[in-house]
């Protein structure tokens, strides 16, 4: 007999295993003793949402001594014959011949008893929450998407690039960086040489984006992508922001904004398509218990074209909407989450790309448009989540880049290498960043981003 079979495999290949002795190992979700003298145990091993029903006769000497200790949360091994199930809700069940208990879970204190728990409560037990249906399903979908991202780019000739986590630059220029230092914050710093004793002898930060370094490699390898952790100390306690999140950043030489937008659309459609086709069980679960419109929303993304409008058009639409927004809209102002959601959920009911933002709103590296007032930026918004992608064509003209840096107060000395990329073989290029958790949030319909990352970091929270 094999060492152990994953439960998901049994469901896919009932014919192969029915009538055979199999061994499964997992955690008990529920146990119910019937008057007919058998115990029904639902065993879950994380391979699928659905567990395997174990039927154990209560009077079998082979396992009678352990059976009474089989409680919700216990880890067990079960061997027995896989048989067609007469009961409702499952095609097969296992008739236990042998049951072994690895680890007991005391029902008096084990927190995950069979009932619904609030997401807030589950966050406090992040070491146990992956054993719940919701968080387990998120983990499987997240895994599948991570793989699909690599597949998408690898099939298109992109090179996977690891950009630094510790960096001296603040790519987005928003001042939301975490400092990296070995200095003791409680000890006074010498004012004349504040970084002299520090590890890097200069201010260093956790990266907010791998873009600037990705540009270096795009201007050598042509097409690259990063997929790594990024960090932002924005003090926004919202359902869409994390202090530590994962970003996918492709960067392409010889691409303009239009090419960039095309790739981003294709990318989103591809990823959503993978979830629709390959994560059906988990997606059905989310549609049933989390967001009834989810499946329909995802199908729309795959089947219908995206809408693309300029920032100026977006502002006009919002102004004449007659909607009462908490933040007023005016040309030159940032689009707030409420505005983004209005456009994608109410006006267009599908993903929307917004391009050509005011120069003043966006970072120094974006390419200035011919009007001199806007830059070749793009944001992609999706229903339910809002902004999921931010990107742009990069400023490849030396004189314009220097003008932008001056305007934004960015030191040419500090970014000498970035400027040199425009002095030596400069070329048009573009890229974007997809917030990985925003994507997982979008395809699972979960209201809070803290549920889609294993261990969320937010203001005041860095547990586990
Ligand atoms: O729009 P952003 O700030 O763009 C950049 O960082 C560019 N350097 C990307 C590039 O062109 N290579 O961030 C990109 C995406 C956002 O659209 C959003 O999905 C996500 O990252 N994001 C966050 N996700 C979770 N928590 C946060 N605090 C996030 N901030 C941005
Ligand atoms: Mg953005």
Image (cartoon, grey):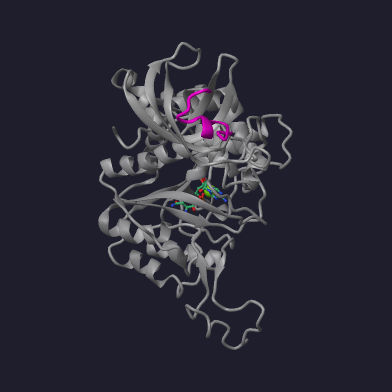
Q: Quadrant of the N terminus?
A: top left
Q: Position of residue 386 (x, y in %)?
A: 57, 38
Residue ID at (57%, 26%): 31
Q: Is residue 242 above or below residue 63?
A: below
Name the residue located 26 percent from the left edge and 56 percent from the top edge. Answer: 221
Residue 270 vertical position relative to residue 233 in the rendered view, above or below: above
Magenta span contains residue 65:
yes
Among the 4 quarters of the image, the one containing residue 235: bottom right
Of residues 217 and 395, the one drawn nearer to the viewer in this rendering: 217
Q: Residue at 31% of width from left, 41% of height from top?
A: 151
Residue 273, compared with residue 124, is above or below; it is above
Quadrant in which residue 399 is drawn: bottom left
Q: Say which of 270 and 15 sits in front.
A: 15
Magenta residue span: 58-71
- How would you classify the magenta stretch by its main secondary structure? loop
Q: Is residue 332 visible?
A: yes
Left or right of 12, for residue 104? right
Residue farthest to the top, as pictured: 86
Is residue 367 visible in the rendered structure shown here?
A: no
| Figure quadrant of the C terminus | bottom right
Residue 435 at x, y percent in the picture: 49, 46
Can you give x and y, in whole percent of width and height, for residue 414 in the image? 46, 73
Number of on-image labels:
0
Q: Nearer the viewer, residue 44 or 391?
A: 44
- Based on the picture, tell me whether residue 112 belongs to the magenta stretch: no
Q: In the rendering, at what x and y percent does residue 33 appear?
A: 59, 21
């Amino acid at each position: 007999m094999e060492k152990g079979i994953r439960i998901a495999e049994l469901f896919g290949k009932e014919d192969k295993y029915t009538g055979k002795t199999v061994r499964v190992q997992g955690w008990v979700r529920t146990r119910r003793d019937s008057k007919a003298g058998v115990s029904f145990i639902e065993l879950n091993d994380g391979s699928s949402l659905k567990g395997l029903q174990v039927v154990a006769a209560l009077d079998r000497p082979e396992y009678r001594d352990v059976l009474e200790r089989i409680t919700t949360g216990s880890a067990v091994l079960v061997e027995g014959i896989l048989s067609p199930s007469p009961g409702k809700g499952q095609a097969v069940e296992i008739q236990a011949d042998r049951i072994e208990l690895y680890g007991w879970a005391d029902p008096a204190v084990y927190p995950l008893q069979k009932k619904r728990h609030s997401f807030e409560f589950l966050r406090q037990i992040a070491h146990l929450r992956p054993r719940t249906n919701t968080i387990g399903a998120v983990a499987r979908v997240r895994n599948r998407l991570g793989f699909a991202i690599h597949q998408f780019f690898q099939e298109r000739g992109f090179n996977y690039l690891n950009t630094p986590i510790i960096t001296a630059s603040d790519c987005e220029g928003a001042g939301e960086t975490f400092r990296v230092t070995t200095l003791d914050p409680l000890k006074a710093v010498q004012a004349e040489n504040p970084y002299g004793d520090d590890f890097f002898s200069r201010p260093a930060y956790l990266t907010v984006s791998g873009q600037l370094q990705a540009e270096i490699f795009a201007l050598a390898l042509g097409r690259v992508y990063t997929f790594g952790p990024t960090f932002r100390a924005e003090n926004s306690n919202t359902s869409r922001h994390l202090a530590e999140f994962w970003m996918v950043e492709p960067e392409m030489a010889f691409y303009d904004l239009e090419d960039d937008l095309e790739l981003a659309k294709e990318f989103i459609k591809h990823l959503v398509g993978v979830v629709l086709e390959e994560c059906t069980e988990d997606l059905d679960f989310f549609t049933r218990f989390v967001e009834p419109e989810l499946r329909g929303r995802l199908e729309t993304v795959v089947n219908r074209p995206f809408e693309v409008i300029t920032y100026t058009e977006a502002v006009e639409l919002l102004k004449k909407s007659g909607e009462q927004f908490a933040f007023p809209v005016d040309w030159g102002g940032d689009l707030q989450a409420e505005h983004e959601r209005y456009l994608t959920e109410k006006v267009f009911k599908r993903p929307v790309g917004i391009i050509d933002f005011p120069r003043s709103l966006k970072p120094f590296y974006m390419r200035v448009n011919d009007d001199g007032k806007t830059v070749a930026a793009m944001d992609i918004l999706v229903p339910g989540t809002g902004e999921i992608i931010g990107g742009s064509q990069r400023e490849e003209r030396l004189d314009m880049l220097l003008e932008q840096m001056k305007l934004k107060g960015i030191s040419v000395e500090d970014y000498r290498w970035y400027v040199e990329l425009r002095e030596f073989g400069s070329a048009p290029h573009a890229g974007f960043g997809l917030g990985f958790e925003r994507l997982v949030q979008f395809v699972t319909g979960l209201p809070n981003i803290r549920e889609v990352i294993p261990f969320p970091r937010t203001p005041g929270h860095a547990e586990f």
